[in-house]
């Protein structure tokens, strides 16, 4: 079997972060979310992986390389325009070469991996195996309708969902999927929908089975979901201390200090991860915070947040529930009269007390 990871798309729900970087490389507990998917495929025994890339392809190539860091062999497949998941399958035809494959959306996170799913697919050999998860808001997703355990209907983001079972961003396909993607037409939004391709197979009597995901599944396409995923992963990590801590600092709970990090006259209440060569000085860092590499937090308070690399936070009285991008400077102003001085890009969002 081969793996097909989709890492195109423009990440519009994460702007302005994604104006300058790939959404699949936003870090969750200081590891790009894309890496969790690659690791899950390798753990399931899939080592030949194609990554479909778009405008941010060069950035993804630099981060992933040839795949050897994951124990995989990676090939990059350019999708000139994001014209739907089924179009991505068409684009990868020459890489897949008639092999059964797992398609994994690069911004998805599933606790526990997909080893059992892949084993089930190998054992039962259906035409398609889809992963499903019960969700309270199914209208946001592709929705599956089952009859006596058999998948009978799929619908993309229905106004009135027929069930609460939504499609998780992982699919297992036999090569017969190519006949389906070649036979469907673009949807109302101008894309070739993978749900339409699977429905095409259902309508022709092909065997489409499902696997109910028991653990957590998070689509990290929005900030709140990224923060929730960060919380889940931080809870799962093992504590390690590779940085330095001054005698007058306090580390409470699970705190991960990566190589070259430094904590000076500060309190950190975990779970927290402090990235390589990041400094925390005269500050409080609260639970569920991930500070990426080469960050400075000085004279500030922050919790339940993700801070990307090379950012400086100085003199901030309280930051929480935030996603802060690369090379950002947040600092207290001593000018009079007191005022907020902002330089913000398109699609930014700021909450002021």
Image (cartoon, grey):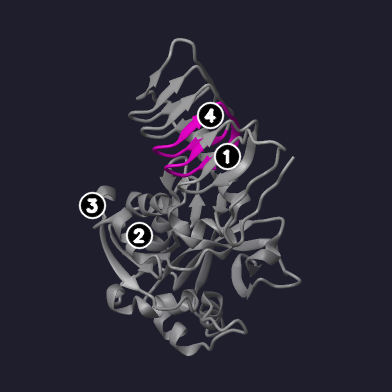
> Which residue occupies the foreground of this view, 212 or 26?
26
Describe residue 239's horizontal placement relative to residue 346 as left or right: left
Q: Give the residue displayed 54% in from the left and 86% down from the top.
A: 186
> Which residue occupies the foreground of this view, 322 or 232?
322
Tag 3: Cα neighbours inside 10 Å, few (<14), some, or many (≥20)? few
Which residue has dot 4 on it? 271
Q: Earlier in the sequence, mark 3 or mark 1?
A: 3
The CA span between labels 3 and 4 is 30 Å
Which residue has dot 1 on it? 305
- Write the start and end of the magenta stretch as one range: 288-312
From the viewer's perspective, is the residue at label 4 or at label 1 nearer? 1
Residue 291 on the magenta segment:
yes
For the question of whether residue 176 can be seen, the reply is: no
Residue 347, labelled with which disc?
A: none
Which residue has dot 3 on it? 68
Q: Is residue 271 above or below residue 160?
A: above
């Amino acid at each position: 079997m081969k793996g097909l990871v989709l890492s195109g798309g423009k990440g519009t729900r994460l702007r302005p972060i994604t104006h300058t970087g790939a959404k699949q490389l936003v870090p969750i507990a200081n590891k790009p979310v894309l890496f969790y998917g690659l690791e899950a495929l390798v753990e399931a025994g899939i080592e030949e992986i194609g990554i479909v890339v778009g405008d941010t392809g060069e950035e993804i190539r630099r981060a992933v390389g040839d795949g050897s860091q994951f124990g995989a062999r990676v090939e990059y497949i350019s999708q000139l325009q994001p014209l739907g998941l089924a179009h991505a399958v068409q684009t990868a035809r020459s890489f897949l070469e008639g092999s059964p494959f797992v398609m994994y959306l690069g911004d998805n996170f599933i606790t526990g991996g997909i080893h059992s799913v892949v084993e089930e697919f190998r054992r039962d050999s259906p035409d398609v195996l889809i992963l499903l998860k019960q969700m309270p808001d199914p209208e946001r997703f592709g929705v599956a309708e089952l009859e006596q355990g058999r998948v009978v209907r799929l619908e993309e983001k229905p106004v009135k969902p027929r069930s609460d079972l939504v499609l998780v961003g992982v699919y297992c396909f036999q090569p017969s999927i190519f006949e389906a993607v070649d036979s469907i037409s673009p949807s109302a939004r101008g894309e070739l929908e993978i749900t339409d391709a699977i429905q095409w197979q259902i309508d022709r009597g092909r065997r489409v089975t499902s696997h109910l995901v028991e653990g957590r599944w998070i689509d990290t396409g929005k900030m709140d979901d990224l923060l929730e995923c960060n919380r889940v992963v931080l809870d799962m990590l093992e504590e390690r201390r590779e940085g330095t801590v001054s005698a007058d600092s306090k580390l409470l709970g699970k705190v991960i200090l990566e190589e070259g990090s430094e904590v000076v006259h500060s309190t950190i209440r975990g779970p927290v991860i402090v990235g390589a060569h990041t400094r925390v000085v005269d500050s409080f860092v609260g639970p569920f915070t991930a500070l990426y590499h080469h960050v400075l937090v000085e004279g500030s308070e922050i919790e339940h947040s993700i801070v990307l690399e090379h950012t400086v936070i100085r003199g901030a009285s309280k930051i929480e529930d935030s996603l802060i991008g690369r090379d950002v400077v947040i600092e207290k102003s001593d000018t009079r009269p007191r005022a907020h001085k902002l330089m913000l890009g398109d699609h930014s969002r700021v909450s002021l007390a």
